[in-house]
Amino acid sequence: MTVESPVADQQQLIVHSQEILGEILLEAGVITSSDVTRILETQKKTSKKFGEVAVQLGLVKQNELQNALSKQVGYPCIISDQQGFPADLVTAYKPFSDQSEVFRTIRTQLLLNQNDMEAKPLAILSPSHQEGRSYITANLAVVLAQLGKRTLIIDANLRNPRQHSIFQSKMNAGLSKTLLSQDEEFPIHQSSFLPTLFVVPAGDIPPNPQELVSQPKFKTLLDASVKYFSYVLIDTPAANEFADAEIIAAQAGMALLVSSRGKTAINSVVSLSNRLKKGNTDIVGSILNAAV
C-alpha cells in the first residue's frame, strides 16, 4: 500500500497554482515566455512566490499582479488605475491583503455561528460618528458577495449616507424616495465590478428620517429583500445621536456592533447593547475597528 504525503500534495498544489498565475499573465500579454523562464530561474534561488519575483524583477506591475490573482481565485477586484472608488474599499482594491483577510475571518464567524444570516437582514450599528460603520458594511458586503452569493447593502443612514459615494451609485433614486412614495420595490443598483453585489442608496436626505424607517412599509421591504438576496446588510446613522439606528435594528432583527479603537467609550457600547436587547434585537457580535 502506498501512502501519499500531504506535504508533497501541498507542494504540488503550490507549483500548480504558480503555473496558473504565469499562464494568466502570459495570456494577458503582461509577460512573455522568456519572462516566465527568467522568473522561474530567479524563483529557484529564493523562497518567494512567482508573483513576488515577477514584481521584484520589474516585469509585472503590482496592479497587474493583483488583477491576475483575482482571476486565478475568482475574486473580482478593482485594479488600482480604476477611478472613483475610495481607497478604504480594501476588500475590492486589495483582496489578498491582511485587512481583507480580517474581513474574511469575520465573514466566516458570522456564517458559522449565525443560522439566520440568510433569513434576516443584518443592521450594522455604532454609537457615534466616524467609527467605521459604512467602512465595515461595505467591505463585509464585498467578501460575502465574493462567495458568489447575491448580497444587498441598504443604506438606511438617512442623516449622513455614504454607500452611494463608496459604490458610485446615483443618490437621488434611493431608500427615502421609496418610503415617501407608493413604490413597492427598492431602487437597486448593481455594482460595476462585482456582479453579485447590489446597493440601495439612501437617496435624498428627508426631513423626517425616523418616521420613515418606523413605518411598516420599511419592515415589509426588508422582509421582501431576504427572499431575493442571500445576505442583506443595513448601514445606519450614529445610534447615540439618533433613534433611527435602534428602530432599524429592531425592524431587521439582527445587529452587529462596531466600535473604534481610541474613539469609542466602552460604556457607550454597553449602553447601546442594553437598549438593543430591550428591543428584542439579536446582537450577533461586535467589531473593534482599528482602521479609522
Image (cartoon, rainbow, N blue to C red):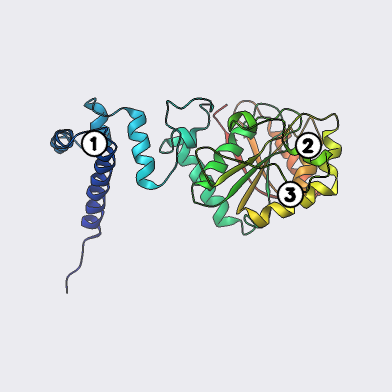
Q: Which secondary structure lies at badge 1? A: loop
Foreground tag (1 vs 2): 2
User: Do the residues under discs 1 and 2 have CB atoms within 8 angstroms?
Assistant: no
Question: Where does residue 33 sit, x and y in percent of width and height?
Answer: 16, 37
Tell me if residue 227 can be seen.
yes
Where residue 96 sits, quadrant-wise, is top left
Residue under label 3: 252
Mark seen at residue 177: 2
**130 and 277: which one is in front?**
130
Q: Which secondary structure lies at badge 2? A: helix
Tell me the distance, in whole angstroms, between the alpha carbons under discs 1 and 3.
47 Å
Give the residue displayed 29% in from the left and 37% down from the top.
Answer: 28
Kindly identify the amino acid type of the residue bearing the numbered disc 2: Lys
Q: Earlier in the sequence, mark 3 or mark 2?
A: 2
Q: Earlier in the sequence, mark 1 or mark 3?
A: 1
Tell whether 94 sits left or right of 228. left
**65 and 56: which one is in front?**
65
Mark seen at residue 48: 1
Give the residue displayed 20% in from the left and 68% down from the top.
Answer: 3
